[in-house]
Amino acid sequence: MSNPHAGISGPGFLYSVEDGWGHLQLDRPDAGNRVGLEMLVAMTELLRTEPQHAGVLLISAAGKDFCLGRERAEQTTPVTPFDAFRPVAAFYRALSEFPGLTIAAVQGRATGFGVGMALRTDLCLAADDASFTLDEIPHGIPPMFVLSELVDHLHPKHLMEMILTGRTVAAPEALAMGLVSRTAPAAELLPTARDTAAGLAGPKAPLVASCKQYIRQIRAVPHASRLDAALSAQTLYAVGN
C-alpha cells in the first residue's frame, strides 16, 4: 500500500499505517501529551487526508498519561476568542467526520481536551488505571466543546455532576457511565487496541464505515419510520455490494 503519511513524525505526534489502519500516537510524554496549536493544526490536516489510506484510525499516547489537555500558555500574540477556539473546533470536526472507525486507547489521565478527544472516537478502550477529568468549570471556563458531545453519552444527572464538580472519574465508573467502551489491564491496553484496529480494518473497513454512517442517520429518523429507513438502507447496501 502506497501512503505518503506512513511512518511520519509530526509536531508532537507520530503516525504510521499498517494493513489498512492508521496509528496516531501523541508523543509529548514529558508534557503530559498536552496539545499545542501547531500540533493541533497538523493532526487536523492528517485526519482530513488519511481516510483515503486508513479505514480505521487508532489514537494512543506515549508515556503514563493519555492527554492532560491543551497547551494554554503558548499563545504570544493576542487573538479574538473566536480565532483562538476555531482550531479546536476544526480538529473536533475532522475527528467526528472521519468516515472510518476511530478508536482511542486511554491510559493514565485524560483531562479536558483529552476527554473531548476520547469522546469523539467511535470506540474508547481504557486502561484499568485510567481516569477522566473535566476541570474547566473549576478553572472558570464553560466546557462547550466537550458538552456538545457529552450530552450524547451520559445520563443528564451524570453529565451535570461530572461537569460542574470537575471531579475525577476512574475507569470502572467511566465504563458504567458510558464514557468508555471497555477496560483492559494497563499492560494489555495497547496490544488490545492494536488487535481491535487490525481486526476491523482491511476487507471489513467498508462494512464498518457503512454501519457508522447508518447509526448516525438512523438517530435522526422518528421511531415509527425506522423500519422503512432500515429496509431502504439494507437494500441499497446489498445492491451496491
Image (cartoon, grey):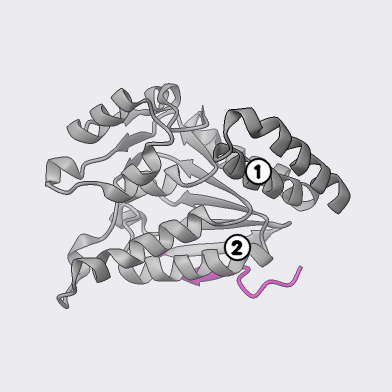
Along the horizontal axis of the image, is 113 left or right of 22?
Answer: left
Query: Quick one: SS at disc 2?
Result: strand
Taking 161 as reference, is 1 above or below it? below
Q: Is residue 32 magenta?
A: no
Q: Nearer the viewer, residue 235 or 78?
A: 235
- The amino acid at mark 1 is Tyr
Magenta-drawn segment: 1-12
In percent of the image, x 37 and y 47: which residue is there? 116
Q: Is residue 5 magenta?
A: yes
Taking 176 as reference, is 14 above or below it? below
- Residue on which the image places disc 1: 214
Q: Nearer the viewer, residue 39 or 156?
A: 156
- Residue on which the image places disc 2: 16
Q: Nearer the viewer, residue 225 or 197?
A: 225
Alpha carbon of mark 1 to alpha carbon of mark 2: how far?
28 Å
Q: Nearer the viewer, residue 62 or 110?
A: 110
> Visible in this render: residue 99?
yes
Sequence-wise first label, 1 or 2: 2
Total label count?
Answer: 2
